[in-house]
Image (cartoon, rainbow, N blue to C red):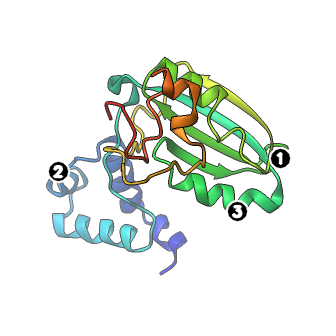
Amino acid sequence: MTKRDILSDERRKEILQMLVENGRISLVEIAKQLGISHVAVYKHIRQLIDKDLLRVQANINPKKLGTHLVLVILEVHEEALKEIMSKFKECPRIILLATMVGGYNVVALMIAENEDVLKSISTVCAIRVLKGIRRSDVYIIADLARPEYLPIKLPFPRNRESPLCERECSACKMYVEKKCLGSPATKYYRGPL
């Protein structure tokens, strides 16, 4: 059975939509609404998971968390693209990381705990200044309309000596002046998350 076959089933589409609207809905409730058994619902969900079309996860409302979102778009030299993507894929501040087609070829959605961290991400952070990055633009997200909830990594893993971005927090003026909380991937992170 192909992925296309799996999504051609109307029941599976209905189950997916119910899970999108409420990821905590029970198998029994889905079964009741669709008029099928909870075992059938489980089988549909299992097939979607087995084919990598569905992943059940907890997402967090960044607004309720009191955080800010930043969209960074980059034009990266082709030779550096793989390395930069690999490096930033593990960054706990990055919620979304993707390559694009066009003038800019990388997009990252990042989280900032406060306005000072937002400034640091926008001006100092290595996602804009790493070797191989030709140009970048940063956009602060004013109001997230959809989705309300995002896959934010909490708690941040704090097991590294130095940040993934190769910038040393201890040498950063914003970190020294206690304006930036530091890289959440390091043991030097001073933030609340």
Q: From the image, state whether disc 1 or disc 2 is nearer to you.
A: 1
The answer to which of 57 and 74 lies nearer the viewer is 74
Label 3 residue SS: helix
Q: Residue at x 82, y 59 (%)?
A: 78
Q: Are marks 2 and 3 in contact (CB under 8 Å)?
A: no
The Cα atoms of the two marked residues, 2 and 3, are separated by: 44 Å
**Label whose residue precedes the other's in the sequence (2 or 3):** 2
Q: Kindly identify which residue carries mark 2.
A: 29
Give the x, y percent position of residue 133.
78, 46
Residue 142 shown left or right of residue 80 in the figure: left
The residue labelled by disc 3 is 82
Q: Amino acid at mark 1?
A: Gly
What's the amino acid at mark 2? Glu
Q: Return the x and y of residue 143 as percentages of the image width and height.
A: 51, 20
Mark 1 and mark 3 lie on one chain; the one further toward the N terminus is 3
Residue 40 to residue 185: above or below: below
Circle 1 residue: 102
Q: Residues within 10 Å of mark 3 (few under 14, many from 20)?
A: few
Residue type (three-letter) at the residue carrying disc 3: Lys
Q: Is residue 69 above or below residue 31?
A: above
Quadrant including the C terminus: top left
> Which residue is situated farthest in the bottom direction here?
1
Q: Is residue 21 left or right of residue 175?
A: left
Q: Is residue 147 visible?
A: yes
